[in-house]
Each structure stands twice: as C-alpha cells, then as structure tokens.
Image: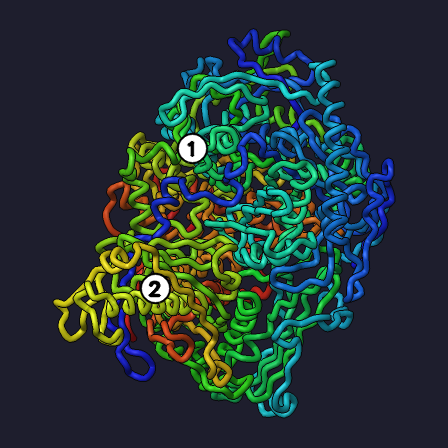
Amino acid sequence: MMDAQENEKGEAMQPMTQLRDRYDGVAKVTGKAKYAGEFSEPFAKDDLVYARMVQSSIPCGTLVAIDRTAAERAPGVLAVLTPFNAPKLNTSKPEPPARRNLSVLEDTEVHYNGQPIAVVVAKTLEQARYAETLLKIKYKAKPAKLELPAKLAKEGRLGEARWPKNPGKEQPSNRRGDLDKGFAAAAVTVDESYVTPIQVHNPMEPHATIAWWEGEKLNLYDSTQYISGVKQAIARALNIPLDDVRVQCPYTGGGFGSKGSMWSHIPLAATAAKVVGKPVKLVLGRTQMFGTVGYRPTTVSRIRLGATADGKLTAVQQDAVMNASVMEDFHEGVAGPAKRLYESRNNLISEKMIDTNLGVGTFMRAPGEAPGTSVLEIAMDELAEKLKMDPVELRLANYAEKDPTSDKPFTSKHLREAYARAAERFGWAKRSATPGQKIEGSNLIGYGMATATYPANRSSAQAVVRILPGGKVWAASGTQELGTGMYTILAQTAAQVFGLDLAKDPTAVEVALGDSKLPKAPVSGGSQSTASVLPAVQAAAQQALLKLSVLAVNDAASPLHGLQTLDLGAKDGKLFHKAKPAHADSFAAIIERNGNQAIEAEGSAEPGQDHSAYSAQSWGAVFAEVAVDRYTFMPYVRRVVGTYDIGTLMNDKTGLNQLMGGIVWGVSFALHEEAHIDPVYGRTVNNNLGEYHVPVNRDIGQIDVTVLNIPDTKFNPLGGRGIGEIGITGAAAAVANAIYNATGKRIREYPITPDKLCSRSLTL
Amino acid sequence: MSIAPCSERQDGELDDMKPGVTEDGELRLTRRSFVQSAGVLAAGVAAGAGKVAEAQAASEVRAGAPRIHAVTVTINGKQQQMSLDTRTTLLDALREHLDLTGSKKGCDHGQCGACTVLVDGRRVNACLTLLATLDGAQVTTIEGLAQGDTLSPVQAAFLHHDGFQCGYCTPGQICSATALIEEQKHGMLSQVSWEKGMAATGRPELSDDEIRERMSGNICRCGAYPNIVAAVRAAAGMGAAASLGSSSRNEVGA
Amino acid sequence: MNPFSYQRATGTEQAVHAIQAHGAKFLGGGTNLVDLMKDNVERPTALIDITKLQLAKIEDAPGGGVKIGALVRNSDLASDPRIVRDYPLLSQALLAGASPQLRNMATTGGNLLQRTRCYYFMDTSYGACNKRAPGSGCAAVQGINRIHAILGQTDKGATSGETCIATNPSDMNVALAALGAVIHVQSTRGKRTIPIAEFHRLPGTTPHVDTTLHSDELITAVELPPAKFARNSWYVKVRDRQSYAFALVSVAAGLEMSGGTIKSAGLALGGVAHKPWRVAEAEKALVGATPGVEAYTKAAELAVAGAKGYEHNAFKIEMAKRSVVRALALAANGTRAGAEGVQG
C-alpha cells in the first residue's frame, strides 16, 4: 500500500486504497470470465451457427469467379457470401481508429494476400471449415507492389517514397533551427540506417464476434478495445441507426492496438447473421490475424547525429520510410522521439511511405515511440561511444527541460531521478565501455541502456455511479478491460470517494464496463484510459455522494439533519459529521428512509482547460544485461531494470505487471518478432505462433520495475499518467546496446536473431 | 473505394442493390436496400439448404458427410456421453458443445498452450486432441480445479501473485502449472535439468529457470512471465524469490 | 478438415490390416497429423488410432541395447532413468523439442514421421510445393528460405517438379541418427528393420516422399545399439527462442573416450537437410584424435562439406560448424557436468 503522497505543489494527496488482488482475478483464474466468442445467451444456444472468413491467396488482382456450388451443397452449410452475392455495405472514407478501409465483399478487387473474399456459414465449426475448402476461386492476377523499404534502401531507391496522404495529429515532417550549421558545429557525427520489421500484435485471444439481430436491432459480442467505436462504425457500415446497435465485451483477451478498430470480420459477421437469420459466431483463426487486423509497419530510418566534444547535440536528423497499404495509409511516427526526446535546436525529421499490397497497418503498442526509441537510442549509444562518454551522461547532457517541439513546460518530468535510480539498481557503474570484456563460461556479457518515453494522453470520458439499497456502490463506464486492471482501478476510484475500505470488503464496489449502453469512454489505446476514465468515475461518485448528502441533511430522521453537505464526510458506508464523527448515518439507512431507490449520478471529465499550456509525457530509464553465447550466438536477456516516471501508480500489482509486460515486449522487439513477407505471394510466411516468435517464459529473465510515483496533478486530478505503452519503449534499444557491449557487433536491423550475429568474427 | 456492380446476379434477386449517392458524393446503399437484399438472400439460402437436406437423406455416405463417433468421457468428475463429428477436437467439444469455455483457443495448432487441460492427469494441448480418441478418459479443465469456492493452490497463487493480465492464457497456464508440480515430483526432466547438470540427480528441484522452461509451452502475450514464475514457485512450495529483482518491486515516493 | 472415419486399433495385426483401407492413416499422438489435417495439408479419410496398442514399453534389446516401443511418449522417454543414464543424448534432444504438453502427447514413432516446417508446405494457399503437391514447383528457393536446407537438397529452380529445400524438423531424429538407431516396422507382409540412416531420405527426384517407410507399414519400435556415449554426449540446439522453437541448426554429438583420445564418435546435424545429416567422414576424423578445438573444427568442416546456402539461410553454414564445435566440446566435458560455465 502506498503512503501519503505530495503532488507537484507539495500538497498532501489522499492515498487511494488499493485492492489487494485484481477485481476480476477470481473470474480469470477459475475460467469463469467470459470473452466475446464464448457467450451462448441471450439467444437460443442451439441457434448459434459458425462463420469462417475465406481469404484471398494472391496479393493483387481481380476475382473472376467464385464457384460456391460444392460449398453450398456441403452438409450443414447455411450460406456462402461472396462479392458476387453479398449485400453491399457502406464503405465510405476511413476515420481511424474505429473506422478503417475494410474488405467486406463490396467488390471483386483483391488488394492483399489474405483479404476476406468470402464468408461460409454452417451449423458447426467443422462443417464451416470443410466447406470453405470447397470454394473454387478464380482470379485474374495483377502485378503486386511488394518491395519493402529495407529492400529499396539496399538498392538506393528510397527516393521513391511519398508523403503520407492523411497524417494524424503528428505531422510527417518537422524542421527547426539550421541543420547544416548544426552539423558544421559538430565535433563528432553518427550517420547510420536502422530497420524495424513488420510486427503483428497477436493478442492471445483472436478477434471474435458473435452477431445476432433482434428485428432491426443488432447485438454484438465483440472482442474489442473500443466498444463505442465499433458501435459507431458498424452502424455506419450497415446504415442503421446508432441506437439500434449494442456492443458488449466484458473482457478482452489482449489487444495491443489490434482491437482498437472495427475490422472486416465484424460487419461480415453482422451481415451473415442477417442473411441466415440466426446468431453467428465468427472467430478469426490465428493465421487470419496476420494482415486482416492490422500490424506495425516496417520502417527504415537514416539517422544523423552531430555533437560537440562534450556531448551536446548540435544536429539531429531522421529520415524514415515505412510501408503503407494500397488500401489505406497508417502513419507510424517513428521519428517522434528524434524530434522530441532530447534538447536539439537543429532538428529535421521526415516520415514517408512506400505503397505495398499488404493489409492496413495500425496502432501497435507504443506506436511511433516503440520503433522510434528502438532506433534513435542505438544511434545515441553509437554517439556515446564515439565521444568516449558514458551513455547516461550523454542523455543528461541533452536533457530537455521543456518540450523541444513547442517550448512548453512539461506537466511533470523527473527523468533524471529515473536514470539515477535505475542505474543504481542495475549496477551500471560496473559496465565496461569496451565491448567483449566480460566473459562467463561460453557467454559474452554486455550492459546497455536507453531512455523510455511516451506521450501522456487524455480524452473526454463519461461514467455513472449508483449507491444501491443496502449501501453498496455500483460504478460503470463504457470502457474496456484488456488486462490493464481497469475493473480494479475503477473500483478503487469509486471506493476512495465514498471512503469504502476495499481491503476490508473487496465487494463494496461493483464495477460494470464493456457495454455500449453504459456512458461513453474512449478507446483503450494510447495509454489514456486511466487518465480519462478515472476522473469521470470520480466526478460521478462525487455527484452521487452529494445527492446522498442532500438526502441526509434534509431528512428529519437522520442524525445529520440540518447540517450543510460540506460538513459531511464519508467512511465505511456511512456519512458522518466531520466536526463530530460520532454523528453518522449509514448509506443503507438514508436510502431506505428515502424510498429505497438507488441514488444515481453521471459524471464526465475532459482534459483540463490549461491542458494546452503544457506538454504531458511519461519517462523512464531502462537498463539491460545480456548473455550472448559465443559459439551459437543465441542472445539471452538476463536482466532488465526499468524505473519510470508515470505520475501516480493506481494499483501496484496491476501497474507493475503491465510495465513488466511492456519490457517483455521490448525484449520481443529486440530479439524475436518479425513477420516475413513472401516477395512473390505477399503473404506472411510465418503466420502462426510457432514461427512468428514472441517470447516464451524461458526467454524472460529477471525484470526489476520501479516507479517514482510522483503525482502529476497538472495532468489530471488523480495524478496518474497511462502506463500501457511506455514499458516497451527504450527496452529494445537497451537490449541492442547490451548486445553490442557484449559482442562488439552493432546490429541495426531488428530483430537481433542468431543469424545476424553469426560470423567468424567472434573467434572460438 | 468504389463499389463494383454485381457481376453475377441470380434470378434478379439482388436487383434491389442499386447503390445510392450520398451527400458526400460516395456510393452507398440505403439501409432499406441492405436489409432487403440480406432478406432476399436469406430466402434463397433457406431454399438451398432444403435441397441439401434432401440430398443428404438420399446418400448418407456421400463425400463431405460428417462421420459421427460416440464417446464417454469423464470431464471434471462428470461423465459425458457425446456423439460428435470425428473432426471435433477436445477443445471444441469443451467450448462449443459443453459450454466449458475456460479452456481457450489461442492458436488451434499446439503453438500457444492456451488450451492446456489434463487428460488422465497429464497436461496436453486440447486443440490437437481429437475427442474421438478419448473414450474412457478422465479430463480435468480449469473449471474442475477449484473445490466449490475454494481455489486450488495454483489458482490462489496466480491470483495472489497477479500471474496474468488479460486472463486469456491463464486457464492454460494454471492447468500447465498444476501438472508441472506433479511432474517434478515424479522426476520428469527438462532441458534445464541437463544444462545445469541436474538431470542425473533424478529429481531436479524447481529453480526459477526450471519453472521458466517447464512453463514455456504456455505463451502469455501480455508478458506476465515474472509473476507466473513467482506464482508457480509459491504453489510448488519453493518459497520466496531466490534472487534480486526476480519479482517486481515498487518503492513509493521519490 | 475433410470428414474421416475413426477406429481404435485393438491389436497390431488388426491395425496393419485396417490401414489398407483407401486414405487411411495411423493416428498416434496427433501433434503433427491433426495439425496438418486442420490446414488441409493432410487429408486422410480414415484414422486408425493406434495409441492403445501395447507398444509403449522400454525394454532390453538382445545384444545389450534398448528397444523403445513406438508409442512411448516423448516426455516419458526423455525422463526414463535408463535413457537418462545410457542415452542422455536422446533425452536431451527430446527435451529440446516442442513443449511439455506436446511431449506428453507425441510418440516415438510419430516423431520419426514428423513433417517439415517449410512455410510453403504447411500453407495450402501457396500453389508451388513439390512436397505437398508433386510437380507444382518450389516457392521456397526464391521465397523466404531462412529455415531451409543447406545440405542434400534438390535445387533445379523454382519451377522444377523436383526442387525441394525443406528440412526435417525433429530433434529426436538427430539424436537417433548419431546413436545409430534401427527402426522396427510391421505390415501384413511381415516385419522388417530399417537403419535410421536409411529411414529418412533426401528429396532426390521425389520430394513428396519423406521416408522409406511404406504407407501401410506400422512403426513398432526403435532399437538403440549398446550405449557408447553415455558419459560424453551433448545436444546443441540453436534457435530464435530459448525454448519452444524449431532449430535453425542443431547438433547431436556423442564421444566414446579411451584414455585421452576419442575412440569413436557419433555426430549428426539437424535443421540443415531433408534428413538428419550424419557424415561418416566427420566421425572418422575424430577417431584417435585428442579432444580439442583443432579436432572439433576439422570435424565441423567435414560435416558441412558441400553445403550451399540461399538468400536467407547462408548463415547456417558457419552456424552449423560452430555448433558442432560447441557440441563436441560439451560432450568431451562430460554430459553430467552440464553446460553452464563450460568455456569449450
């Protein structure tokens, strides 16, 4: 449990009582937590039928014909939808995150290998899977664009790249100062190119939708990070009123960005349900998650750094090229950290695109910052080495006191403390600056570090809170639980307002989320849910408490009768007179005497008025120790130490767990993940969890995570910034730099697999 | 993206699907046309399905007809008699037919471990186990581990050590860990046993590396591995963390 | 998956008769067959479940070796005290493969028949795969070939009906090759034995054929000759993860020591060819040598002689050599000593 804290102004803040175990923990360890594809009600279970999405096997061309005869005759088959017979949906312009450019059988064009081109509906899953193999599909192939940026870089053809068509809030180019002057003033320069691969989110729960119609009304159980986004997007796709759609998702089995949008399978399931007149379940196979539900684009970045002899950056340049889908641009802001992370007056970045016949890219854990820090922080390590400077010292020499892109002050920044704390816990002082010095058995040992950073985001959110007859509290918001601990911290936030001790009674607050009937909350992405939803819950709870207080002071039967509501406090299910705490009245009694109806209040929260006067960002320092076998070149991350400045941590258990998970993603970025695209077929060849490698338990050594826990009340009243993304940032570069320190091999192309380290240079 | 006209139209059934032009100049269907065209298609589908049923009756053994196999399996102590398509895996039988959705489908190919259950006491991937092969077998799933409201020691350890985030891999992790502890008691080895020179001792102790290796058949994409190791260590009675930083720690206030 | 009939075999004789039905296949642990059936790569119309046959014993073989029943599960075999004591190489190789769950399911006989992990074989959406669709060509030679063969492959270009650069993915098979195992098989025609070196085959002109086992033959046992490498053997597996991943390259090395020199050696490589790659010249070069980097390097060079890499897998040549050196060093150091802290 946390001690009392002080905010930036030195004012004492009421600590939040933490739930000891996750609110949803028992449901998850007993298998009772129901995920979207697992419901067998409220429809009749026997009515539920199964849909399979059939995908193209060419990357570009036209569907000439799909012979459905054999499939339609197969046992159990209820419908086969193809572009030649399917009802047409509304395919207007994409509006990310919720609405993307989909493939919903609207025409016969094939834009990528794996594009949905048919849906087979059958009574059983086995029958549907068999029937899909009976479709006879005829294509007229066209030449596909499948050259990825790394190939073009090798051939000196990056000039073919173009600017993004519709960049998001971050512009794809930015210039400040005079770059030439900056490089002219540099004593030392670095000029290298770095590659990050296509990565695929692969949450453990595949995307899943159950769709059923009640007359004109559509119901969905959908595995999503954004119930209200899906609701809006599906209503538009089907041209039905928003109020005719309900989306539910009490648990999301991971998303990492891939469930922040409505992808093709959702409208296809809804259409199939309408066509067959039954509830339809459509769950993606693992292989189907490679391309149809987003991925992180591959990037090539040329980074040039110039610095004075004492390490001050005089010039920073990053020119990035990424792949885009011919269907829709997704702009990965890979040069964001080069623009923003360090003090650099002369700065130029560009982010361009190459069209490819691949599916649409999307937000993946720490979009921009994950690949951005992964490449920039290697370049910084290279610069430190050339300067013969400690890598931490180099970062401190370029510490940004204000946001370099806007000159705005930060709401809160304590990165110096993070460097110091993490370095101390790691034992950084023992590092040898010369690579290849530390040998244990057959292992070369190396240390590396990097800076972690991610913007702090906040959006408007709404919540509703009820004080129930009997005195318990119900708190709800249309947000999502992805494993982030949303149920837990939502319960805690409500409990704090009502003075309920969850340690004594973990059931004092009941939480509801994941239902589009509840007040609207933003997408669970961009590390914004904590900062957005909790203030709304707090506001709703305060309003409900006020309503209860008004009842009490106006109730002649209450010991609190006649007092001002301001005189009252709440604790352990009772209102009490602050001046005379013995004068108290229980929630239950007040409600019972006043009609025994639940007291309800809604609350909403917006980013503060002075929000735009500040820049809000989270920070961290991450250190890694690796062991590289000098015979087999297998790298192993023995230890990662990360210290983060993320404002107040709302729950130690769930929060530290999520930060550790982010570091695991960083290790994965560094060593494991890459979707290999066949150069002819344009298909991800390793489209499964056996060959698309994410870390297994054995890959992860010791992880030591600490947080500074300094509240950021300029950002929001609860003092917390999001933590979903920052863990992955910096971690990959820390590992890459440690591998260099171990082996003297500088690998600038992720992932750092044994083949890239394999050469004769590490002699036996 | 423009909508291509339908190039195959049967019996004029899709004639209602004329795209309209909206105020922003984009082609789209009206709501009426979506609902109607879906309805017309549904009628056609129903007719087709009728023909299929007829054909099925006529020729029971024709290509594509499912083969049904009856088995009796004890699941979580309860005997279940099932006559299902031979293609049905144990995982799909549990999830789609018995409403035991605790066992998860993550990859359906034995590559993630989310479907791990115990068959006759051994942990296996339910996604690669055909139900037909299990006549007479005893199956334990995540739903069968707790005694009423009392969590099993492994479940309690996962809860206490927060050995999960999204929870989707969790039932598989817990079933796997439950078996792991028994396997160790019976002297089962891992590659770590060999690497550390412990294989010949007969019953290597569950060091953190042993736990990591023996839990490597269960992928957790959220990355809760350190907490999973802590949970298994606790459930196996191996005590607290052996070394610095192997579990997370939090220091409050700067 | 297409529909199939299922029957549980009641005896070996009954099983080898039942398999004669058109489209029938034996079902063991199912970890590979069911996997491939789901993706429509394997399409049997009848499954003969052999898992209840009495073929799950590990027993003494005449002549001092050991006979392993075809249905012994990988996990049981790896932890069997006799295997651990006399054939640690086999235990190590088994434990380097798959996951505990899969090892609990997979059988000895099934593992021998494990099919390649070539992407283009496993995914029917690729038109070209001579192994899956004979005569269709090979997408791998000009595709992503990072996990493919560098030795013994057939490469007549992407469009040739003979080209195949797939590898055998099994770890167990590599150890069995180094140990000189013999496979016992049975059919209605009788029983026969196949030396492991002749069991798996190179693609030659018929890459769709993995082994010399006939389609109606049942593997009943694997026999290992008397243990020679009990004290000095090691299995090295190089892969992209620390566990639960297929080998980029693996090496099974066994040494029989006499005084200060090597009396005999067993050496086989995995992940490099269509079959476990055992080179007699490399083994011979070790005989009589003093253990040390010089002898190991010489053997390593011989082991990969004639190797040819492709765009993405050329690294395997150097990696294989270094892994041979490492495996031999660890073997010489003593199996029971483990690997940690062993410099090499």
A240 is higher (above) or lower (below) than A623: above
The residue identified by callout 1 is B117
Disc 1 on helix, strand or loop?
Answer: strand
Identified at 80% across, 58% down, the residue is B27
Tell which of C7 and B39 is nearer to you.
B39
C321 relative position to A239: left or right: left
Q: Position of residue B167 (x, y in %)?
A: 42, 47
Three-letter residue code for mark 2: Thr
Count of numbered badges drawn on the protein: 2
What distance separates the C-alpha of mark 1 from that of mark 2?
A: 37 Å
Q: Chain of mark 2?
A: A
Circle on res. A493? 2
Identified at 20% across, 66% down, the residue is A556
Tell which of C253 and A660 is nearer to you.
A660
Q: Are marks 1 and 2 on the same chain?
A: no
Q: Position of residue A49 (x, y in %)?
A: 61, 34
Q: Nearer the viewer, mark 1 or mark 2?
A: 2
Q: Quadrant of the C terminus of chain B?
A: bottom left
B162 is higher (above) or lower (below) than B171: below
C90 is higher (above) or lower (below) than B58: below
Q: Quadrant of the N terminus of chain B?
A: bottom right
Tell which of C91 and A409 is nearer to you.
A409
A531 relative position to C269: left or right: left
C248 is higher (above) or lower (below) than A479: above
Three-letter residue code for mark 1: Val
Q: Does residue C206 appear anywhere in the picture?
A: no
Q: Position of residue B131 (x, y in %)?
A: 51, 24
Disc 2 on helix, strand or loop?
Answer: helix
* Residue B84 falls in image quadrant: top right
10 Å neighbourhood of mark 2: few (<14), some, or many (≥20)?
Answer: many
